[in-house]
Image (spheres, helix red, strand yellow):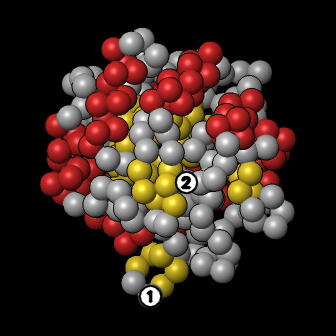
Amino acid sequence: MEKLIVVVAPVGAETTRTQNPGLPITAAEIGKEVRDCEDAGASVVHLHVRTPNGTPTQCPEVFREAIEAILSRGCQSILQVSTGGSTGMTPEERLQALEAHERVEMASLTTGTCNFGDGVFQNRKSLVEQFAGAIRKRCVKPELECFELGFIENASRLLRNGLVDEPAHFNFVLGVPGAAPATLPTLLAMVQSLPSVRSTWQVTGIGRHQLPMAVHALLMGGHVRVGFEDNSYYCQGRLARSNAELVERIVRVARELGREVASPEEARRILHMPPRPSL
């Protein structure tokens, strides 16, 4: 079985400091958090950014400040920006993240529309194709975000039409209110629907589902995402002290179960990506 890729999503667009006071917001806080997470075993960072008052933004300058803070601490992790942004953002706003920094190696690409709590995360077919084209033009690897089973067929269409290259990497986001539930049968169905045996995949469990979904994935040969974007708690009734604490836990569980954790360079090889770019 391949080594486990641990993705950390330290910021997100929904979590607030009222929910978890440890949420990193400033560039310096994000840089320190990513350094700590890499030291704990993470090899990919899925990045959102905020304005000083905590409002989600896709402003390239804010992304650049955060990425420079990450790089200044010697981090080697794969830098993945979000093109999902936050519900209510325009497509133009969301795509700004692709212009953030020369070191960006991956970008999330949501392949369909779903309910998202009381909102709707809208990604019509033409928009998904537009985003896929923009990511391809930027020469970064897309992470195909799938909140429902049908999203995988939408992603497969992108592959058939040459808008995404094989082998593709999928992120199954499970447990969002209004979208696919975080259950083992759901995860099994999604894995069985992958378009190719060469596809790689990870699971993102929302809230209390983060740990059980991650354990299922690591036992099945998939990869995992943890972090404050998706879950603020370490266990029932106790907030996680940091993103690194969540990384440390899944790394410890993986090693107890006999699965070693990938370094950033090993993660690049597993994801069929070139070596880390140099400036």
| Point 68% across, 75% down: residue | 17
Callout 2, which amino acid? Ala
Q: Nearer the viewer, residue 111 or 118?
A: 118
In the rendered image, residue 33, in percent from the top left (x then y), is placed at 66, 58
| Residue on which the image places disc 1 | 237
- Can residue 273 be seen by looking at this rendering? yes
| Point 37% across, 29% down: residue | 155
Quick one: SS at disc 1? loop
The reply, left or right, for residue 200 in relation to residue 123 is: left
Other-residue count near label 2 (Cα within 10 Å), few / some / many at <14 / 14–19 / ≥20: many
| Point 64% across, 20% down: residue | 138
| Residue on which the image places disc 2 | 9
How far apart marks 2 and 1 lie (CA) works out to: 21 Å
Q: Earlier in the sequence, mark 2 or mark 1?
A: 2
| Point 24% across, 23% down: residue | 196
Quick one: SS at disc 2? loop
Callout 1, which amino acid? Gly
In the rendered image, residue 267, in percent from the top left (x then y), is placed at 45, 33
In which quadrant of the rendered image does the N terminus lie?
top left
